[in-house]
Image (cartoon, helix red, strand yellow):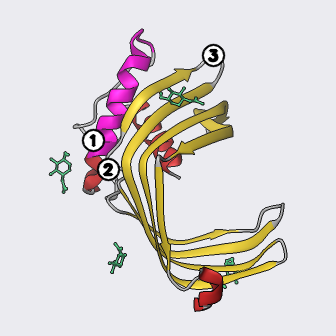
Amino acid sequence: MQSLIILSLLLTVCSSTHLPSTFQKCDRHKGDFNQCLPKAVENAISQLNHSIPSVGLINFEPLKIPFLSVAPGGGPAQFYQNYTNLRLSGVTKIQFWRFDVDFDKKVIAFDFTNPELVLNFTYDVGGHILAFPLTGHGPGLIILSNLLSNYSCHFEEYEKNGEKHYRVTRSDLLMQPSLIHYKLDNLFNGDERLVK
Ligand SMILES: *[C@@H]1O[C@H](CO)[C@@H](O)[C@H](O)[C@H]1NC(C)=O
Ligand SMILES: *[C@@H]1O[C@H](CO)[C@@H](O)[C@H](O)[C@H]1NC(C)=O
Ligand SMILES: *[C@@H]1O[C@H](CO)[C@@H](O)[C@H](O)[C@H]1NC(C)=O
Ligand SMILES: *[C@@H]1O[C@H](CO)[C@@H](O)[C@H](O)[C@H]1NC(C)=O
């Protein structure tokens, strides 16, 4: 999710239209483009701790997501996860270590760290892990400390109404927090025998 935000910001930083005057710009045709990008994107994200209505940018601190549903995947863990009133804090405190855009190979790769990401939500889970039932509903909190993320994606160019557009065809995200702290109230619907 955070990578999607960064990607759309990257497109904003690269196109000269609708850009807040306080955002630093990078010229794709200049040799220092990949050195310019990490600082420019980092600086742009750090400014999102307030809304910028003139260009339609909302406040990202916290980032509010009304509803998020994660369908059961394959494998032994078969449960759905529904999150409501999700609030993600710490997004704008970000540092980029690498930001490479290769227009020939059509690959974007960046590494970034967040000192702390806090997720606050109401959750609803139901299903089973192997034969073990899992259900629960309640408030939840997840804190990721010293998060290092590596993101890469492949993109392709296409034309629409005579204009050049880009579309992500494949993306990979690796997130490595040094510590995960979580609190899910009422997991197993308060059955203490299962929580212990
Ligand atoms: C946003 O972040 C900047 C830089 O860290 C800080 O100076 C400013 O006070 C913050 N604004 C708000 C509304 O928190
Ligand atoms: C979770 O969300 C899915 C998709 O919107 C919905 O079908 C399902 O009923 C929801 N489950 C609960 C318990 O809210
Ligand atoms: C992730 O990013 C860090 C910091 O730039 C880097 O040292 C590390 O090699 C990267 N890991 C992967 C798997 O790309
Ligand atoms: C989570 O958000 C709710 C609603 O804003 C707030 O009342 C609660 O204190 C928050 N919890 C934590 C642990 O920050």
- Residue displayed at 59% across by 89% down: 192
Quarter where residue 9 is shown: top left
**Residue type, numbered disc 2:** Val
Mark 3 vs mark 1: which is more N-terminal?
Answer: 1
- Placement of the C terminus among the 4 image quadrants: bottom right
**Where does the magenta region start and end?**
29-46
How many other residues sit within 10 Å of disc 3, few (<14), some (14-19) or many (≥20)?
few
Mark 1 vs mark 2: which is more N-terminal?
Answer: 1
- Residue displayed at 32% across by 50% down: 55
Q: Residue furthest top?
A: 31
> In the drawing, what numbered circle is on residue 143?
none
Quick one: SS at disc 1? loop
Residue 73 inside the magenta-drawn segment: no
Q: Give the residue number, with chain letter if any, for mark 3.
A: 104
Question: Height in image: 41 above or below 182?
Answer: above
- Residue displayed at 78% across by 62% down: 73
